[in-house]
Image: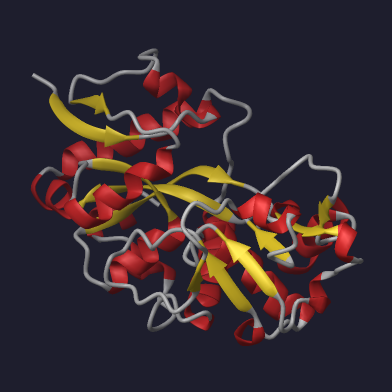
Amino acid sequence: MAMRLRTLLGDHPGTTALKNGSIGSDLVAFDFAQYSPTNKGFKPMVREGAFDVSEMAIVTYLMAKSFGKPMVLLPDVVLARFQHGYALYNAKAGKLGPRDLNGKRVGIRSFTTTTGAWLRGILANDYGVDLDSIEWVTFEDAHVAEFVDTTRRAPAGKQIVQMLIDGELDAVLGEKSDHPDLKSLFADAAAEEKAWFGKHGVVPINHMVVVSRRLSDEHPDAVREVHRLLAESAAVSPAAPRFSRDEMQRSLQLIIDYSAQQKLIPRAYAVEELFDDVTRALW
């Protein structure tokens, strides 16, 4: 009988075949939890170990690792994207570019979001922004309960994009909007992304997949099968993220470095440390 695994996995191009049952296994079966959006399930995974297999934001995983949470990374990317298009300012208040953010009020859903960490790394390292000079305004706490958040919390009931529209924030990270007053912080986001890729050779990873340490320790064959199924599901979708080992290494190392720089984690890990003996052999 197949081992049933409590699973959190969003609807992505690379997970469709797995979730709709067109790819299956005699070894494992998935009981999919329903969270919308999927990131609402990251907190119960980190805090309670709610799933055997879970999609996970990579910065949340790095932070969870730093606090010894019992989970292990698989080399399976389910969401990756360039980040420059997820930063907005209110043009009614005057033109604002990335180099103008020093000393400004910047909103972000949570200080620890992966998109936020990527964008802050880009702002600091490619545009010389002093992240410590910014007044960060947040709306949610971190998935990892032990993280001490020193940002200013927005008043209860306030919405991030509306605060930007109302002039209560100078810019926001991690958001998109078609409001006519709101413009991209990066004047030509697509061109900036192309130039950034030319410089770094990195496609930013947002979400990967983790398994519980117990599953990896006690049922390594099940973990190997989960990876096989994820890889097979991704292979049949032309829109699924594609990463060679070197490409994944570069992306992971850069977000590790950004996360350490931003004090989200206590030190910069080597990429190999994110895996255990079972999952490292799958990479």
Label tally: 0
Task: Report x, y in % for residue 28.
Answer: 20, 27
The colour scheme used to paint the residues is secondary structure
Residue 84 appears in view: no
* Residue at 26% from the left image edge and 49% from the top image edge: 45
Task: Report x, y in % for residue 88.
Answer: 75, 57
Left or right: 187 as drawn, with respect to 137 = right
**Eyeballing the image, is 283 above or below 227?**
below
* Residue at 86% from the left image edge and 43% from the top image edge: 180
Task: Report x, y in % for residue 67.
Answer: 25, 72
* Residue at 19% from the left image edge and 37% from the top image edge: 222
Residue 247 appears in view: yes
Pick the residue in front: 136 or 154: 154
In the rendered image, which quarter contains the N terminus?
top left
Pick the residue in front: 166 or 207: 166
Left or right: 274 as drawn, with respect to 187 = left
